[in-house]
Amino acid sequence: MTKAILQLGALTCPSCMQKIQGALEKQAGVEKVKVLFNASKVKIEFDDTANTADALAQVVKNLGYEVQSVKVKQPAK
């Protein structure tokens, strides 16, 4: 599993967390999503043969949230 961390602009309400998490969980290859409200980060574990970190960041952007950075950690082979 590939891991990505999306640094977001400030999240203002708990419903934002649920909206982001729900949208990402529906994406192909996504195994796990954790939204860290206070840190304004989203941690995602996904299959990189089915999706990309940039495409997942775009899903969040399409919801109207600012994605400030995307960090990807490839699995050890």
Image (tube, grey):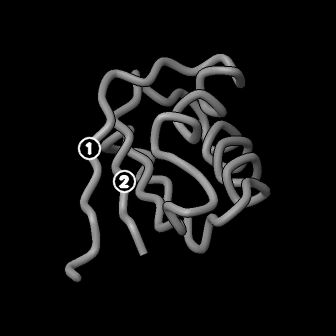
Q: Is residue 29 left or right of residue 67?
A: right
Identify the residue at image location x=57%, y=36%: 55
Q: How far across and down, in percent of the image, does residue 38 sit?
A: 36, 44
Q: Residue at x 66, y 33 (%)?
A: 59
Q: Position of residue 21 (x, y in %)?
A: 65, 53
Q: Residue at x 47, y 67 (%)?
A: 45
Q: Residue furthest left?
A: 76
Q: Quadrant of residue 74?
A: bottom left
Contact between labelled residues 2 and 1, with CB atoms less than 8 Å apart: yes
| Side of 14 where 34 appears, left or right | left
Name the secondary structure under disc 2.
Answer: strand
Q: Is residue 31 left or right of residue 66?
A: right
Residue furthest out toward the bottom: 77
Q: Nearer the viewer, residue 13 or 71?
A: 71
> On the rendered image, what quadrant is the C terminus found in?
bottom left
Q: Which of the two discs, 1 and 2, labels the residue nearer the N terminus? A: 2
For this rendering, which residue is in front, 66 or 17?
66
Provide residue 75's location: percent of width, then percent of height. 28, 74
* SS at circle 1: strand
In the image, residue 75 above or below residue 43: below
Label 2, residues with CA under 10 Å away: few <14, some 14-19, many ≥20? many
Q: Is residue 10 above or below residue 16?
A: above
Q: CA distance from mark 1 to mark 2?
A: 5 Å
Q: Quadrant of the N terminus?
A: bottom left
Residue matched to label 2: 4
Image height of 29 relative to 7, above or below = below
Q: Mark on residue 71? A: 1
Mark identifier at residue 60: none
Q: Amino acid at mark 1?
A: Lys
| Residue 9: x %, y % from top left | 40, 22
Amino acid on which the number 2 mark rests in the picture: Ala
